[in-house]
Image (cartoon, rainbow, N blue to C red):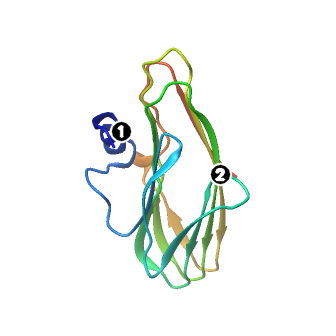
Amino acid sequence: MDAIQKNLLEQVAELHDVPEGAYNIRANGKSAARNTTANIDIVTKTDKDGIDIIIKPGTKNQSVHIPVVLSESGLTETVYNDFFIGDDCDVTIVAGCGIHNCGVQNSEHSGIHSFHVGKRSRASAPRSAMWSATTARGTALGRTS
């Protein structure tokens, strides 16, 4: 990742280094880095762009980071991320989108997220890591369904 992308990661996901635990970092339309853990698996979808995040039952005090950064002009993408959170979980999800676009074309990332939450489970997202954009000409869209 270049300096612009690293700066965006700091702004949208408060990442100054590779996070501990599970993560999937997407940069300019491609997976830049991924790590899974014994309790959190991240699997690339085969039918469309996106990932499945599978959190095993009983997972507590763990987090998953799925930030996106765009630094290319004219890049438009839509990804579908599905969270499958087992019963009795307490996890933190850090998802952010940062766009730095100094070109003449719009850049856009749309993340469509669905959550399947098990019984007695809780998933939280820090307010500071919500969808945002740093851009000259660009948009960042975040939706949950």
Q: Position of residue 12 (x, y in %)?
A: 39, 43
> What amino acid type is highlighted by mark number 1?
Gln
| Residue 38 relative to residue 18: left or right | right
Q: Residues within 10 Å of mark 2 (few under 14, many from 20)?
A: some
Classify 82 as above or below 91. above
Classify 23 as above or below 117. above
| Residue 80 relative to residue 8: left or right | right
Q: Residue furthest right?
A: 47
Tell me which corner region of the image, top left, top right, bottom left or bottom right, holds residue 98: top left
Classify 145 as above or below 63. above
Disc sitting over residue 49 in the figure: 2
Residue visible at 44% across and 79% down in the picture: 60
What secondary structure is found at the residue carrying circle 2? loop
Residue visible at 47% across and 18% down in the picture: 103
Q: Position of residue 96 (x, y in %)?
A: 46, 46
Q: How many marks?
A: 2
Quick one: quadrant of the N terminus?
A: top left
Depth check: give the residue in front, 75 or 23: 75
CA distance separating discs 1 and 2: 21 Å
First in sequence, mark 1 or 2: give its number. Answer: 1
Depth check: give the residue in front, 4 or 145: 4
Depth check: give the residue in front, 89 or 109: 109
Residue bearing the label numbered 1: 5
Q: Position of residue 65 (x, y in %)?
A: 43, 59
Q: Residues within 10 Å of mark 1 (few under 14, many from 20)?
A: some
> What amino acid type is highlighted by mark number 2?
Asp
Disc sitting over residue 77 in the figure: none
Residue visible at 50% across and 25% down in the picture: 73
Tell me which corner region of the image, top left, top right, bottom left or bottom right, holds residue 53: bottom right
Q: Position of residue 20 (x, y in %)?
A: 32, 67
What secondary structure is found at the residue carrying circle 1? helix
